[in-house]
Image: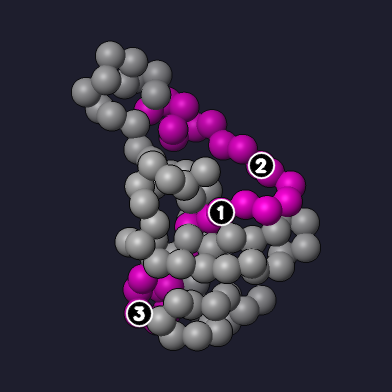
Amino acid sequence: MLIPHPLLGLRDAQEFTYLGDASLMNRPDPGAPDAEAAFCDYVFLRDNPAGVHRELWFHEQGDRSWLVVTRNTLTHEILGAELAADVKVGGVK
């Protein structure tokens, strides 16, 4: 599987480490009244979607950048990738 790195072009997926759902970028507010329950959900509850999904990937064996990769989990087709630093926090679904 090839990942289209926004700076380096197509890279083999073996250079990356998969880190899960990109919504993990939206951490709960620790000062919120329901912070304990929110962090419990954040840490332990995960969706397992079938179809198009946004994921975090770390370019461990490359430039060590974080990417948000849009991938179809049924076909493994990569639909796009962008630097996580460029993704608006709160905009990842």
- Is residue 17 at least partly visible in the picture? no
Which of 86 and 13 lies nearest the eye of the viewer? 86
The Cα atoms of the two marked residues, 3 and 1, are separated by 21 Å
Provide residue 91's location: percent of width, then percent of height: 43, 45
Query: Quick one: label 3 or label 1, which is nearer the N terminus?
Result: 1
Residue contact between numbered discs 3 and 2, judged by CB atoms under 8 Å: no
Residue drawn at x 35%, y 38% as measured from the top left: 27
Instruction: Say what amino acid the circle numbered 3 marks.
Output: Asp
Q: Quadrant of residue 74?
A: bottom right
Residue bearing mark 3? 63
Taking the magenta stretch, the answer to whether it contains residue 25 is no
As helix, strand or loop, the secondary structure at mark 2 comes to loop
Residue bearing mark 2? 48
Q: Residues within 10 Å of mark 1 (few under 14, many from 20)?
A: many
- Is residue 50 at least partly visible in the picture? yes
Provide residue 69's location: percent of width, then percent of height: 54, 63
Q: Residues within 10 Å of mark 3 (few under 14, many from 20)?
A: few
